Amino acid sequence: MRVYSVVDIRTGKVSLAGSLLRQMTEQQKHELRTLQLGKDKILNYACPVCDQRVFLSGSGAADSKVYHFKHFANRGDCPIKDGENLTREKLLQLMYNGAKESDQHKRLKSWLGNFLKSLESNGDFAKTNIEKRITSLRDRMLWRQPDVSCTYNGKRLVFELQLNPTFVEVISGREQFYHDEKTFICWLFDDFDPNNTDLSERDIFWLNKTNAFVISDETMRLSEQNKDLYIECNYVNPVMEDGRIKNEWVRCILPFSDLSLNEGYYKPFFFDSDAAREELQKSVLVPEFTSYLLGAERRTIDYHERNAIDAKFIRKFGDLRPELPMPNEFTRGFINIVDAINFLKHGVTGNMFNSYDNIKQYTNQIIQNYSEFGYLFIMAVKKLRPDFKSEELSDKLRQKVKDFWSGYKSAEKEGRDDGQDRSYNSILEIMYPELVEYLLPSTDLF
């Protein structure tokens, strides 16, 4: 039976048979057949489904021979040659398991498992096993058999050597399984070149905050030398260049203890490229938006142009927080609370259409005219101007604040609408992360 994909048992790399053969000259094909079928029977290719060795065969005239790989006759069962109707998921799972049995995979797996066992007396790693089945605590019918499993500082951890980044469906399924079991999974490559990666490799590291980990002869030597597990980490460091974000790859070798293992994420990482990229995006977006919102341009352009620019900024904020709802427009109340918070942070007004220069004026403006942001303003004063005391307000204004707060707390206690506009919380959270705790109800008053 013809085999359409083959695994190189030396490296574990799975290739489409047709693609592999197109890269070979006629002479190389004959040399391969001589190695496979000659005296020494050197068989370096196998079926990725059943792990049986396969050989190169051909048919047709000499000048138009068609080559393909096939199973040996009477060498055991294989779902492919037995004509089983396999689902894509099952076929990928079988191919993944077959690819794992390469000589390189066995060597690295054995070294990693045995080395971690040697570290157990140090206390960080414990309960190390090689290829021990892990059965789901939720469904006993679900299980996985990782290359190496252990605990690390009391946290469940598995290592999977990914020498053939072809089967993204299988990889995704394993990540979900371990996430559901509250077990950390660390994918390890045996080599990584950021300038030469295929799509499924990128699926792995882009979804791990662009961290790609490697186990190599160099890291094994350093591990044994330092009596600690060392790995190579490749990650993206976003940098701003000419007003645009550029990705710079960084390579370093570090001890495993330098990685972050955050509960709920369940994949170790060293550098959070996603967070770094978001901070750069915010460093450009927030000042640009604030200048537009409070400046003269928005007041002078026509209605349609203003709506178009407003929508552009809303989309940009939405790109940063796609999981959060975004407002449809910018009200005068929102504009004034942004102006007020900016004053509290920087001591100057950004709104050219008012001349406020003290907290008392902003307090009167928000509490009197835009009380839908009164709670946030009060908490912003407490956070950003902790030295400010309510005694600095006039008696009349201080009474306004007390009346507002009393009404707010009564509504909260009785479960009524407190009158606060929280439709802008998603944008305010991005603009003022230091106030995120105050975008929810509190009990304090300055």
Image (cartoon, rainbow, N blue to C red):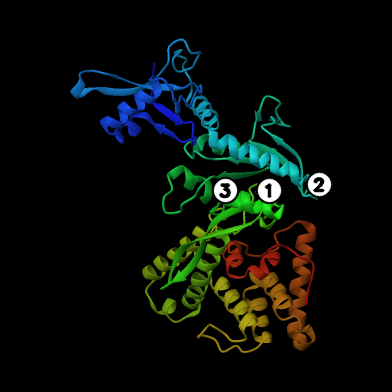
In this view of the protein, can residue 400 be seen by the observer? yes
Which residue is denoted by mark 2 in the rendering?
121
Q: Which mark is residue 217?
A: 3
- The residue lying toward the viewer, choosing from 413 and 140, is 140
Which residue is denoted by mark 1 in the rendering?
264
Please provide percent x and percent y for residue 99. 51, 31
Q: CA distance from mark 1 to mark 2?
A: 28 Å
- Picture residue at 62% right of the left edge, 38% below the top: 109
Please say if the residues under marks 1 and 2 sit with CB atoms less than 8 Å apart.
no
Please provide percent x and percent y for residue 430. 58, 66
Instruction: Assign the C terminus to one quadrant of the image.
Output: bottom right
- The residue lying toward the viewer, choosing from 265 and 324, is 265
**Image: 339 above or below 229:** below
Q: Is residue 157 left or right of residue 73?
A: right
Q: CA distance from mark 2 to mark 3?
A: 24 Å
**Image: 92 above or below 344:** above
Mark 2 vs mark 3: which is more N-terminal? 2
